[in-house]
């Protein structure tokens, strides 16, 4: 049987301190995975004259998946390729409470939902500029009731919601709901009361897709109402799908319900490729201290293992982490402990 090929990009600042022991731990499971680290970022710029050399792109193209550490610098060129170059349109962000997580909620038990963020369009297409550049367009503000040319000096950004982009990400959400035990519910949220044409289109296309899945409950909420419900009744939700900007913001907010971004995994899926990364940033303030929480990285690794077909290994790794949190003796500072990153990974390894 041919080994799976995984490209590893460690990221910047404190991110490699989580990635390296996480990869070592997964590699120790002897699953038949070849990990490779092609040049990327500043090291690649120094040695090859480019932060994202052709050889690195070729390695990604030849791999089964990429395991990505958080970036705040030059390795972001690889992330840009993994997202838009590979068209990984569905950013899947699980939020699941585990006993021992340092949640701020009084009763976090039973929180177990997934946010599916459309990953490629919306305002993140980056179509921005000076208002004067579009002053000649025959467009009048529906709310201010005056032409663009009369709004004054300022900037603009264009929000784009396409049918194809919405169809595929909403179908991904329903497919996830089909495979999950329990609620079998898909929730759509966006600002369709105010942005009636763009966000309204996202909701309407989602409702159309819902008819393909009659066994899955379907509901919609205006995004501000949804925010309130997410905080007051998080156990209600199962799979939630939304446009890019809302998903970026609310998935981070959701992590706060269970104990922070150190627990927030993610996987970005396209039709032919996927990559996996922790949702937190690079944490430059703790770089070199060996205290970054590797839980998000390891949980992203679980998602990666499932994608590669190693479902039993993914379940074993997740269970080992659950045991570490249940015991509560070897937790990193963000979760109320004093363990080092590597000590946490060693504790997880002891439960495999």
Image (cartoon, rainbow, N blue to C red):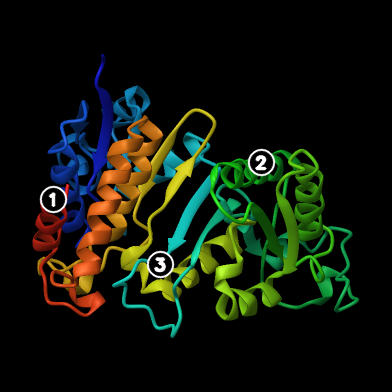
Mark 1 residue element: helix
Cα distance between the residues tagged 3 and 2: 26 Å
57 lies left or right of 159? left
Closer to us: 298 or 218: 218
Q: Is residue 248 above or below residue 224?
A: above
Q: Residue at x 15, y 31 (%)?
A: 30
Left or right of 29 in this view: 155: right
**Residue 297 lies in quadrant:** bottom left
Seen from the viewer's position, the closer of residues 146 and 264 is 264
Identify the residue under disc 2: 171
Rendered view: 209 above or below 272: below
Disc 3 crowd, CA 10 A, few/some/many (<14, 14-19, 20+):
many
**Residue 319, labelled with which disc?**
none
* Residue 150 showing in the rendered view: yes
Badge 2 crowding class, 10 Å Cα cut-off, few under 14, some 14 to 19, many 20 or more, is some
Instruction: Compare marks 1 and 3 and give the one earlier in the sequence.
Output: 3
Quadrant of res 45: top left
CB within 8 Å, label 1 to label 3: no
Location of residue 156 in the rendering, given as x and y in whole percent from the top left corner: 68, 66
Q: On the image, numbered disc 3 is attached to which residue? A: 97
Tell me the CA gap for discs 2 and 1.
36 Å
Q: Is residue 294 visible?
A: no
Instruction: Check disc 1 and report the residue beneath it.
Output: 349
Residue visible at 35% across and 66% down in the picture: 98
Secondary structure found at label 2: helix
- Residue 218 location in percent, x, y? 74, 55
Q: Nearer the viewer, mark 2 or mark 1?
A: 1
Identity of the residue drawn at 37% across and 30% down: 309
Q: Residues within 10 Å of mark 1 (few under 14, many from 20)?
A: some
CA distance for labels 1 and 3: 21 Å
């Amino acid at each position: 049987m041919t080994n799976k090929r995984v490209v590893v990009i460690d990221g910047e600042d404190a991110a490699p301190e989580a990635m390296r022991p996480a990869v070592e731990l997964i590699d120790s499971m002897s699953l038949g995975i070849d990990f490779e680290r092609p040049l990327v970022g500043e090291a690649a710029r120094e040695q090859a004259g480019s932060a994202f050399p052709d050889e690195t792109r070729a390695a990604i193209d030849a791999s089964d998946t990429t395991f990505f550490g958080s970036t705040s610098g030059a390795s972001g060129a690889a992330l840009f390729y993994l997202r838009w170059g590979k068209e990984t349109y569905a950013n899947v962000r699980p939020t699941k409470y585990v006993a021992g997580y340092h949640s701020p909620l009084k009763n976090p038990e039973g929180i177990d939902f997934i946010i599916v963020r459309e990953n490629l369009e919306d305002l993140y297409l980056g179509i921005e500029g000076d208002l004067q550049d579009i002053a000649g367009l025959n467009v009048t503000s529906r709310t201010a009731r005056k032409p663009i040319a009369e709004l004054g000096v300022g900037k603009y950004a264009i929000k784009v919601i396409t049918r194809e982009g919405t169809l595929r990400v909403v179908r991904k959400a329903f497919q996830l709901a089909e495979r999950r035990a329990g609620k079998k519910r898909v929730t759509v949220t966006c600002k369709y009361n105010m942005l009636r044409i763009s966000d309204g289109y996202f909701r309407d296309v989602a409702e159309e897709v819902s008819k393909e899945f009659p066994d899955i409950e379907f509901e919609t909420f205006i995004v501000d109402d949804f925010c309130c419900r997410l905080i007051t009744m998080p156990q209600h939700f199962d799979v939630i799908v939304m446009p890019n900007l809302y998903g970026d913001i609310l998935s981070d907010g959701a992590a706060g319900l269970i104990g922070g971004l150190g627990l927030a995994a993610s996987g970005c899926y396209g039709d032919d490729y996927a990559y996996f990364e922790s949702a937190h940033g690079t944490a430059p303030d703790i770089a070199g201290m060996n205290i970054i929480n590797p839980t998000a990285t390891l949980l992203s690794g679980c998602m990666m293992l499932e994608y590669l077909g190693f479902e039993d290994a993914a379940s074993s790794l997740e269970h080992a982490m659950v045991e570490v949190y249940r015991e509560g003796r070897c937790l990193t500072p963000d979760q109320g402990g004093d363990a080092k990153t590597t000590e946490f990974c060693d504790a997880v390894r002891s439960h495999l």
